[in-house]
Amino acid sequence: MLDPRLESSKAFTKAPIEFDEAVKALFEEHFTDEAKKGSFDAQTYIYPNEIIIRIGYLESNSIAQVNFIVSADFDSETQDIIEISDFILLGLKDVFSNFFINPKREELPYVWSPVRESNDSLFYKYDATNYALENEASKLLGDDSLEADQELIVGDLESTDDINEILDSLSKRKPSF
């Protein structure tokens, strides 16, 4: 599970696997040279007041993964999940573009920071966790707490119908920048 930016973000729902796979494909298509040298992965968490998307890049023959996690405020009553997710993905594209040009990890923020100085609604941070390796280690150790993260957690959204509507709209679309 990813650490949310907002203190109020406790319960979450993971986006459909179809959405995360489509996001991964989007980054592979956009960053073709990097995709030839490694692999991308994606995770999306939907909180009642926040959406977080993590894109990870693992270079072949490396154990250290580059993860950028972007967060945006979200109100399911007044905002469209598609517009917010596209906004986040555009921010992630910018962050990865800058990283691939200047891959100095020591200059990356480990705490939530604005993606652009003039934009206070989109935040990101860097993380070097190899999530696939972490999941495999947990399975070998018999720790199923990460498996629990895969379950639907209702939280503060008004109803299961609200969550299902959000998940349905994400699973039926191809993400874009």
Image (cartoon, rainbow, N blue to C red):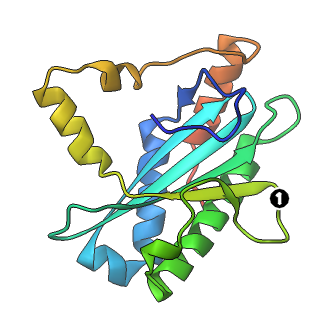
In this view, the residue farthest toward the bottom is: 101
Residue 136 versus residue 88 in the image, above or below:
above
Q: Which residue is mark 1?
A: 120
The residue at the point 79 percent across, 31 percent down is 76
Above or below, 17 against 174 in this view is above
Rendering coords of residue 24 (x, y %)? 42, 58
Residue 144 relative to residue 117: left or right: left
Image coordinates for residue 19, horizontal then vertical, percent: 50, 45
Q: Answer with the quarter of the image where residue 147 lies.
A: top left
Q: Is residue 177 visible?
A: no
Q: Residue at x 77, y 13 (%)?
A: 158
Of residues 62 and 41, which is closer to you in this image?
A: 62
Q: In the current view of this chain or complex, which residue is farthest to the right? A: 78
Left or right: 112 in relation to 78: left
**Residue 110 in sight here:** yes
| In this rendering, position of residue 2 left or right of residue 173 | left
Q: Amino acid at mark 1?
A: Asp
Question: Where is residue 177 drawn, in percent x and y?
Answer: 64, 67
Image point (85%, 28%), residue name: 77
The quadrant of the picture occupied by the N terminus is: top left
Q: Secondary structure at mark 1?
A: loop
Considering every residue shown, the one lying at the far front of the view is 106
Left-right relation of 110 to 31: right
Residue 164 sits in quarter: top right
